[in-house]
Image (tube, helix red, strand yellow):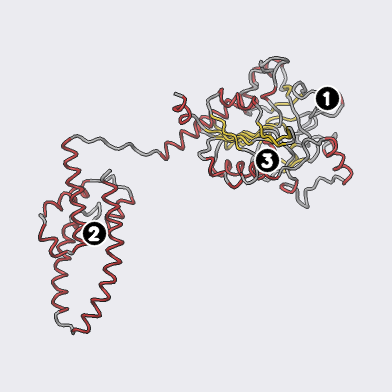
Amino acid sequence: MASDLSVILPRVLIVSRRTLRKNKFVDFVGEYHLDLIVGYGAVPVIVPRVNGVHMLLDSFEPIHGVLLCEGEDIDPSLYETEVDVSGLSPEELEEIRRLHASDTAIDKEKDSIEMRLAKLCLERNIPYLGICRGSQVLNVACGGTLYQDIEKELSKKHNENYELKPQNGVQVQHINYDDYDGHRHVVQVVEETPLHQWFKESVEKEGKMEIWVNSYHHQGVKKLAQRFVPMAFAPDGLIEGFYDPDAYNPEEGKFIMGLQFHPERMRRPDSDEFDYPGCPSAYQEFVKAAIAYKNKVNSSTSVPQPLKLDGEMEMKRKKIVRSFSIARNIYSGGLGSGLQRIKESELEAGAEFLESNTALSLQQENRLKQMGATVRNAGSYIERLKLNEERERLARNVMGKMSVEQLSDLLAFYHMMGQICSEVLERKLNGIVNDIDP
């Protein structure tokens, strides 16, 4: 049963993060992510963050979904331009590296792996869920930019298109190193978005479009890529969630979304109970989309099972195969004598098959045309053979009037061409018989 499930369930790729343990690097993925992916019916496939893996991503096919989560800061060169720079001084950058030492070490291999996966999802409409850093990767992959440090750059500036006063007049704390899981800050949920739908019961109960979320980041979306729509804002105006409305329909295998906060960690103290019923919904809908995407891909690439024939049908099949085999032998072994040694009825079986069959693939039809046979005009199948016999008779009369030198040159030329044609034609005709004869 387990082996059957591994084939049936969709494959979701998750890139690992590395950490130093006993003077060696260890790759890991948080179990909250893995538990939710497995619990909703998908198989997590961990992509190790090791050098060179970004060149081996084809080996992880098939890919039915990609979940990218936490990690180090993204290389600023991937999103900063001369027009859109942070404006931070060298002293400020050094202070940021000191305050956030565990996050500011750039991991270019992880960047390469995750950027390639994000762009692959965008190109092929593969379901994508980005959590924390994963949402930032998605935004950068689509042309958006990031604040290199929220506290330094965003400060007390608010989103010009969204008026929300700071909490009690103080700056929002997006990271708390002393309370990793317990830290919360409020966000305003945007109406008529998937996030609103997932937390609708909770916000209606509270009477305001707000939820308290867990976050652990010092960077965030600065300029949101054009294709995305915000789903939530922090009090300082920072975008905490976004999605592509044109690529969101889980039932049809569409899901492109980024969440800056951590819904998987929003749980009550010393418990696995979520803060809100809607917390796991992002994972649930993401897996639903991965399942639908897998089914859609499989239906478009599925190969029909071989047809089991009864005795009578098997006899007809053998006659058709023999008919094509005879035609092949005539062409490769000589037309005149070949046509005299066989019965015309043996060729008619192939002609009738062509005339009545309308289910040949384009490849099969093209191969059959090499013998002068077509689906639309199967009668020419035999006529072509007879015509070639007449041509052979006329050719003999013409060559009877040629000199020995002319015949020698002609023979050498056609001997060479005959060898080439025979080899090529044999391969093509063999292909036809192999297609019909399983």
In the displayed structure image, the side of residue 152 where residue 292 appears, left or right: left
The structure residue drawn at horizontal position 87% and vertical position 39%, both measured from the top left corner, is: 95
In the displayed structure image, the side of residue 139 where residue 392 appears, left or right: left
Q: Is residue 171 visible?
A: yes
The crowding category of the residue bearing disc 1, from other C-alpha atoms within 10 Å (few below 14, some 14 to 19, many at least 20), is few
Q: Label 2's element?
A: loop
Residue 409 placed where, x, y %? 25, 80
Q: Is residue 225 visible?
A: no
Front residue of 34/349: it is: 34
Q: Nearer the viewer, mark 1 or mark 3?
A: 3
Outermost residue, front side: 22
Residue that badge 3 annotates: 139
Q: Amino acid at mark 3?
A: Asn
Rendered position, 6 above or below 438: above
In three-dimensional space, the C-alpha distance between marks 2 and 1, rounded to whole angstroms, equals 81 Å
Q: Are marks 1 and 3 in contact (CB under 8 Å)?
A: no
Looking at the rendered structure, which numbered label has been put on residue 372?
A: 2
Q: Residue 388 occupies which quadrant of the picture? A: bottom left
Outermost residue, right side: 91
Q: Amino acid at mark 2?
A: Gly
Q: Residue 413 occupies which quadrant of the picture? A: bottom left
The crowding category of the residue bearing disc 3, from other C-alpha atoms within 10 Å (few below 14, some 14 to 19, many at least 20), is many
Q: Residue 233 occupies which quadrant of the picture? A: top right
The crowding category of the residue bearing disc 2, from other C-alpha atoms within 10 Å (few below 14, some 14 to 19, many at least 20), is some
